[in-house]
Structures are given as structure tokens and as C-alpha cells.
Image (cartoon, rainbow, N blue to C red):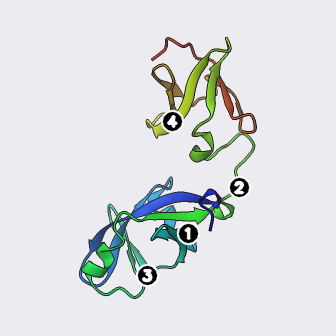
């Protein structure tokens, strides 16, 4: 399995209880959405493996899964911090003009004056809107709103914005 075909959707946390359960740290928009994907892929010994959990439970603040062939916290803890990924083809198709965050990472950000502000290093949620973290000469936070984002061209790997170089 090639990592280019995969998208990280979470990772395993700490062992939970005494029977081979482990916490799942979900990176999906709603934490429980991670459970809708099957199979998962996990990276063990630098090799991606197809993975199925035996059972799952949603807790108030977390998700836990029962690991196969695992009956103790010691066995479960061997999975701690292992990435959970899915095939890109498992993702729901987006409407035109919508993008998954990882598709925006690395794109060059250029303003209306053709000044290169930098490249998208990451994104963050603020509650009101998402924000591009752009790193160039300095770190700039650019709101991902229709007023600021002029055009996203994933083919040319460019995001055009209505944002000045001196804005923080």
C-alpha cells in the first residue's frame, strides 16, 4: 500500500481498561465519523497493513475500539501512537470548490498583487471559519473565507487570495 493513496484520519491513544481496548484519537470533522470507514490501514514496522477492529464504543469524550487478538492493556499499548489511515477512495466526494485540508497543504499562496506569501503549512479551526497557516518570509494566518480566497488551483498548486503581505 502506497502512503500517497492514504489519508490519515486518526491514531491510537492509550490502552483502555484491561481487555485489549484502546482509545482512538479521531481527526475527522465529527470524531465518530472515523468509525464509518472500513477497513482502516495502520503502519506497523514501516509497512501499511489493512486493519479491522472487533468492536467499538463511543464514550462521552472519546472513542474506544477492541483490538483483534488483544486481551490485555500491555498488548493494546503496543498500538499507542500508531497512525490510522484510509484509502482516499473511501472519502465522500466533495462538491466543486470544496477540498480536504490535506489537499491544501503545500500549495503556494499568492495575493492579488502577485506577491508570494508562502506555502500552506497547516490549517486550523477557529469556530467561525477555517484559517490557512501560511509560512514564507514570516508566518501569516489567512482566513479561509469566500471574501479572502479568490481561487484554489490544485493542478497549478496555487491559492490566490485577497490578502496583503503585511497582514498578520
Q: What residue did someone put label 3 on?
A: 55
Residue at mark 2? 93
- Discs 1/4, front: 4
Q: Position of residue 37 (x, y in %)?
A: 57, 69
* Residue 61: image location, x then y, percent: 32, 61
Cβ–Cβ below 8 Å for labels 2 and 3?
A: no
Q: Is residue 104 above or below residue 69?
A: above
Give the SS element for disc 3.
strand
Q: Is disc 2 placed on a helix, strand or loop?
A: loop
Report crowding for label 2: few under 14, some 14 to 19, many 20 or more residues within 10 A (C-alpha).
few
Tell me how far mark 1 sits from mark 3, CA to CA. 13 Å
In this picture, residue 6 sits left or right of residue 166 = right
Residue 7 in the image, given as x and y percentages of width and height: 57, 57
Residue 112 position (above or below residue 8): above
- Say whether disc 2 or disc 3 marks the residue closer to the N-terminus: 3
Q: Residues within 10 Å of mark 4 (few under 14, many from 20)?
A: some
- Check disc 4 and report the residue beneath it: 121
Residue appearing at x 51%, y 23% in the figure: 136
Tell me whether the residue at label 2 lies in contact with that at label 1, contact meaning CB atoms closer than 8 angstroms.
no
Are dots 1 and 4 in contact, CB under 8 Å? no
Amino acid at each position: 500500500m502506497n502512503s500517497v493513496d492514504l489519508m490519515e484520519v486518526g491514531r491510537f491513544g492509550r490502552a483502555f481498561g484491561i481487555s485489549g481496548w484502546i482509545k482512538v484519537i479521531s481527526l475527522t470533522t465529527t470524531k465518530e465519523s472515523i468509525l464509518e470507514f472500513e477497513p482502516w490501514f495502520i503502519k506497523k514496522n514501516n509497512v501499511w497493513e489493512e486493519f479491522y477492529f472487533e468492536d467499538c464504543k463511543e464514550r462521552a469524550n472519546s472513542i474506544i475500539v477492541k483490538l483483534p487478538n488483544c486481551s490485555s492493556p500491555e498488548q493494546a499499548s503496543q498500538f499507542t501512537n500508531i497512525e490510522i489511515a484510509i484509502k482516499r477512495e473511501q472519502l465522500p466526494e466533495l462538491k466543486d470548490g470544496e477540498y480536504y485540508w490535506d489537499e491544501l497543504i503545500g500549495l503556494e499562496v499568492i495575493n492579488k498583487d502577485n506577491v508570494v506569501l508562502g506555502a500552506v503549512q497547516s490549517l486550523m479551526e477557529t469556530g467561525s471559519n477555517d484559517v490557512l497557516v501560511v509560512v514564507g518570509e514570516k508566518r501569516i494566518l489567512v482566513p479561509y473565507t469566500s471574501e479572502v480566497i479568490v481561487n484554489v488551483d490544485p493542478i497549478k498548486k496555487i491559492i490566490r487570495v485577497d490578502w496583503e503581505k503585511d497582514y498578520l
